[in-house]
Each structure stands twice: as C-alpha cells, then as structure tokens.
Image (spheres, rainbow, N blue to C red):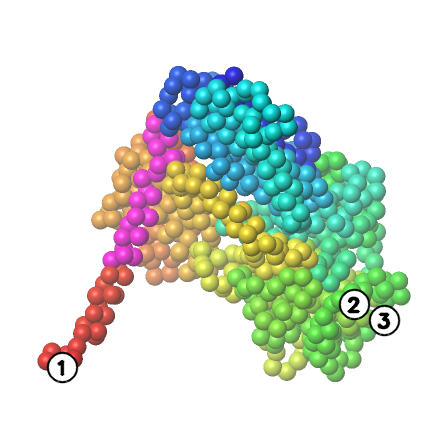
Amino acid sequence: MSGRARLAVCAWVATLMASCAMLPLVSPATWIIQAAFMLAVQTGVGAATRRVPLARPLTVAAQALVTLLMLTLVFAHAQALAGFVPGPEAFQHFADLLREGSDDVSRYAIPAPLHDGIRLMLIGGVLVIGLAVDTLAVTFRSAAPAGLPLLALYSVAAGLSESGVSWLWFLLAAAGYLMLLLAEGRDRLAQWGRVFGGAPRTTPGSESSGPLAPVRTGRRIGAVAVAIALLPLPTISGGLLDATGTGVGAGSGGGGTISAVNPLVSLRDSLNVDENRQVLSMSTNTNDVSGMYLRIVSLDDFDGTTWKPSQRHIESVPNTFPTPTGLGADIERTEIRTRISAADWYAQDWLPMPYPPSGVRINGSWRYEPVGMTVVGDHGQNTRGVSYEVTSLDVQPTADQLAEAPEPSTALRNQYTKVPKSLPAVVAETARKVTAGSTSHYEQAVKLQDYFAVTGGFQYDTQVDVGTGRDAIAKFLKDKQGFCVHFSFAMAAMARTLGIPARVAVGFAPGTPEADGTVSVGLKDAHAWPELYFEGVGWTRFEPTPNRGSVPAYTQSTTPGSDVPDPARPSASTSTAPSAAPSASESCTAQLRRLDGCTSQAPALATGGDPRGPWWYVQIVALGLGALLLLTIPLSPMLWRTRTRSVRLGAHGRTESGAAVHTLAVWEELTDTAWDFGIPPDESLTPRKAAARIVRLGELDPVAAASVHRVADAVEQVLYAPRPHPASGLAQDVRRVAVAFQDTSGRSARLRALVAPRSTVRVVWALSAWRTSVTKRVAALRPTLRKPSGQQG
C-alpha cells in the first residue's frame, strides 16, 4: 500500500472514530454502518482519482459528486432521475427531510428515534466532515488542519449528548487524529530514503540509533498529550436536548410512564421560527374562541431552576374522562366539541386539547395520564397528520366563587406549594408586597396577574438576557423584561410562596379565525401560562404575560386605575414583517428558547446548567465551526433566497397596515420568482401590466395566470384604494406560480433558479445603496470640519 493510500485509510478511520461521539444521540445506532460504507466509497473515489491523476480541485469535485449521488440513492431515490441523479424534486425532498430532522432534534429526548430526517443529518454530516478531512490530509497533504473538522464533529456531538463517558468519545477522536498525524509523518520520513524506512537498530535499547525512533517518539508524545488533555477536559452536560427526559419517565410508555419528550424544548423551537407554519386546524361549536387555549401538558415539579412534568402513571384512554379534580357541581359550565387536525409534519407526543377535557376520539396508540388529564402517544405514536375530536368543558366560575373557595386538602397543598430552599428570598418578598392587603387567595392571584400584565412595568422583549440558574426569577423581577415563559414561571413560583397551589401549562394560545369558520393555530401561538388551584373550581387559568392570549373574565381586576387588557382579545403572536426590535404586537415570536429556559445564548429562566467553560475550549470550538461555515459559502445564494421566500410568504397581518405590508412582500416574491426563471422586473409597469407580462413571457397555464392576476389586483388595492380590502391566500398563489414556472422550464433553468437565483443581485444593490448613503453623509459633514477662509492656524 502506498503512503498516500495508507493516509487515506487513516483519514477514513479518524473520521469514523470521531463520529462515534454521536452514537448515544439516536437509537438504534445502525446508521454508523451505513455511514462507514458510504465514507469508504467516498475515500475510494478520492484514492482512484489521485492515481489517475486528476487536478486537486477535480478530485474534490469528484468525491463531492459521488457523495451527492449516494445520498440521493439512499434518501431520495423516488424523487431522482434513474434513482440516483438528483433534480429539483430530490433537492426539495432533502430540504423537507432536513426540516423534519431539525424538528425531531428539537423535540425528542436522547436517544432520539432514527427517523429519516435525523439519519440524513447524521450521515450527511459525517460525509461532509469526511470529505473535508480527506481533502486536507490526503489531497493537499496537510493533516494538521484536518483536526478542525474532526473537532467540530466531536464538539457538536458532545454538546448534545448527556452521556457520562464523553471522555471516551474524546479519546477515540483524539486517537484517530493522532493516527492521522503519525501516518502523514511516516509518509514524509519515507520520502527521504531507505535509512528511515526500517533498518535494524545497531545498539539494543538505544532509540536514537534506530530509523523508527522518530515514529516511536511521535507515538509516545501523542499518548502523553492525550492523557494530559483528558485531565482538564470539561464535562459537557446539557446542550440542545438538556433535561429532555427528566421528570417524564424512562419507560416506553406502554406500561407505566410517559415517553420522554420535553415540551419545553418543543415550545422553545416553535417560538424561535421565522415562518409561522400552521400546526393545527380546528373547528368548534362555540362562537367565542378567544379563550380556546390548547393545553399539551402541565409542569408541576419545581426545583427552583426549572419547571417540568412529574413522573406519572399512565393508563388506557377511557371513553369518558372523570370530572376534573376540585370542580364542584355549582360551577357553571358548557360542553364544547372541537375537531382538531394536526399538520402532517407536526410530530408531538402529547395531544393538544382544550382543558379540562371530558373525552377524546382518536385512532392510534395513545395513553391517558389522569392527574394532568393529558393524552400521550405510546410506542412512537405522535400527532403527525392525525385528526381527532375532543369534548371539553368551558368552566365559568365567578369572582365570588373563587374568592370564597375553601382551603384545598393538605395532600394537594403540600404537593403543589412546594418551593426549594434555594429559591431567592426576593421572590417571596415581592409576592407578599404585591398582594399586601388581600383577603383571599383569589385576590392575591389577581394582584399577581395584574402586577405582571399591567401595573408592574414589565415588558415583553425577545432580546433580553434575564440570566440562568436559581437566580433567574430574581433577575427577571429586577429587570422586568422577558418572555411568556418567564411570566408564567415567576407567577407560579410566587403563588406557591403564598400558599396557593400552582403549576405551569404548556400549549397554544388562541389561534386565528379563518374565513371558512376554522381556527388556524401556528407555531408562534405556542405559549405557557400558570394554572392555580381553587377548591370547588379546580385548576384555573391565569394570564400574566402582556399582550399575549386573553385575560379570563373571572380575573378582571377591581383595583382602581388598573387597565386590564380586553379579555376577548385574541392572541397577537405574529408580526407582519421581520423586526430586530421587540414589539408588543409580536408576542412570543420568540425566544426564550422555549421554555426550558434557553440552553443556548437566549434568555433562560429554566436552565439549571452553567454554560461557562474554559475560554480556550470555546475558542477552539468556534474556530472549528467557522471552518465548517466556509463550506456553505457556495450555497449562500440559495440559502439567502430560501430564507427571503419563507419570510415574505410566512408573515401575515391581522391589521390593515399589516396586511398591506404582507401583500407588497408577496408581490415582490412573485416578481423575484419570475426573475429567477429569466423574466427580469420592469419597474415602469403597473402591477396589472407587470402581471400580464409575467404570464406572457412565462407561458403560464390559466390556473397560474389567475394566481398572478389575483396578487396584482391585491397590490393595486393596497396602492390605490381608499380603504383596501386585503385578499387571503396570496402566499399560496405565489407558490402555485413557482410550481408552474418549474413545470414550464428546462432542467438547466430550474437548476439555475435554485442554486444561483438571479434575484440575489438585490443583496449587491442593497450594499451599494448603503455605501452610497454612507458616502453622502460623510461628504455632508466635511464643510463643517473645514476652517473658515482666511482663518489663521
């Protein structure tokens, strides 16, 4: 075997050893076999092209092409030409799989199930890293920089894994890297001649006299370096999936406990999306949907750092649910029937339902948790594409009934008023100060709600850093800025210090009524709110988050001067356009990064881990990730165009001005889509004439042509009508036109529109305009800096 072939094998082995760090992330771990085979093929192609020989860039291109063909054969053969040649449909399928994989990573606990999306992310990531390592170490004969992609691979895996043997994965990755360095060193020494190739030693026991002494010395130095590195190695705990299994049981869900999926992580990711994708569509027999919260699960275990579900016994779903705990016969209630359909991409283990439910009709493998009155999937069952019918109660207590509620049982009070000793004293002190003079727990609860929502000066802000750990609530009370999670967590904790049983519910705020009578619930409607227990009424919803959801009628404040928001106000969870600044109308666009409290750099009320680590380690990880970022530069036009499209078509407005902004954004997306397929925009034309030109030059069919004209008519309404009436379904019209362009265009035109869209020139124009504006401002300042004529120095 030649020296370069040996180096290629070592690069293959080193990549596989570093990839082993990802084995604990999913179950089963059979993906590593597939990845090893595909990586071997990639390495073999590189070895073959280097023997031809081909130019170095052509070698890398050949390996990248074969890698793409293999991924297409494995993951998108049904959408590819001849089963392995990728086309637009295959690339779209890749995008769908990556989106599903991203959703699954955010939703599932470790080990996550090996769905196709996650499998593509794992195998694709290993192949990309393997290509980078082979290129650096073998093609360009520089093994030392190849450690950066290997480090990035290990760091991502270790950052996600909760395994207590992260040192073992580090040892494997480091050993593979050292093997690669030694193989390169041996190859370089061999080029000097036979004297370094293996002649016998002349003096027994003397290392310096033997030709293999440099190699042996290198091995020993490497072993000592790895041993030293293991001593200060930081233990990486948490990560994106931190605590996903805690509090919800470790079983399969078939016998006694709830399957481990963390609602906090799921909520965090939902609030942090750019596109408000529809999650659920529901129809109900009630006229007022402003209070139609869809509850997923309740969090009742509070350790001072985070709220999480207690481990509960589960059983078969009963035909009729029992009466909710604490609900008395004298409380007015109305039975509501709701039909709910989940999107075919939304895979949530818990079933979103109005609370309290009294029955559910659903097909599949589901289990019932009686304490929280929740329904959870069993043996991999989730909500993806399911339809179900829920019967629930609209409980309508009066303020007097809540105020006169007796003390709950001792057992319930002990369980739901527990707070840890580590909770900062300021939390209880603030609760007592805010509720001073109250004569009942109900009055205390209303004052707490008003304190957060109205009188306390709190602001809903998606960009703040309110701290982590046990002091997070105290910092939130001091800074008075946070997300829906911070408000609900803080109010529930303060209520417990006052002796009021409290927990936090996770789910969706009321969605948006549609023209057909249904209600659309989007990702940005994800929400958290506190539930307080009153004997005779049961668990009762409160809404402390400003400009979010709806304030229950039974909590309307009687405090003079308070201005409680309208209880009929629907959720204001979406904005009409992206904005860097927080807005009261953009409730929970969000970031708390979802309820867990931000395991990354977003604010984290609920995170218990300390993200601090050795600065050198953070720098190395950042450097490795930066090297990987360079690989995305050729795809940046496609990525920019994809994000721009999702922003333009994903936003929508609930006011006239917001709808107008959305309509103009949709029109711009339509003209840019036409531009990508070779029809440049003509700014001199009216929208109607521009639409006719697009239809004519694009040779669109009648259905797509009608869509183009509908969008143009909506734009003219916005631009010229005294009181425009914004149309609905414009985003879908643009998507229909895009599909029509793909159908009428050749393969090269479709590929050009996808990979190198012409409309990305707008980025260059924007930069040029910015530069011109800055130049003019600087030039305008120059006369004021000059001395008056004739002035002496």
Name the residue carrying label 1: 792
- Residue 356 visible in the displayed image: yes
Residue in the picture at 40% in, 27% down:
61
The foreground one among 192 and 574 is 192
**For the residues carrying marks 1 and 3, which lies nearer the camera in this image?**
1
Mark 1 is surrounded, within 10 Å at the Cα level, by few (under 14), some (14 to 19) or many (20 or more) other residues, namely few
Q: Would you say residue 149 is visible in this rendering?
A: no
Q: How far apart are marks 1 and 3 (CA)?
A: 89 Å
Instruction: Answer with the quarter of the image where residue 253 lies.
Output: top right
Where residue 225 appears, x then y in whole percent?
60, 41
Q: What residue type is labelled 1?
A: Gln
Residue drawn at x 78%, y 67% as measured from the top left: 421
* Picture layout, residue 341 above or below residue 429: above
Q: Residues within 10 Å of mark 2 (few under 14, many from 20)?
A: few
- Callout 3 amino acid: Pro
The alpha-carbon separation of the residues under discs 3 and 2 comes to 27 Å
- Residue extent of the magenta highlight: 748-772
Of discs 3 and 2, which sits in the foreground? 2
- Closer-to-camera residue (317/269): 269
Instruction: Verify whether residue 750 appears in magenta.
Output: yes
* Residue to which mark 3 is pinned: 406
Query: Residue 14 at what x, y percent from top left?
Result: 57, 31
| Three-letter code, disc 2 | Lys
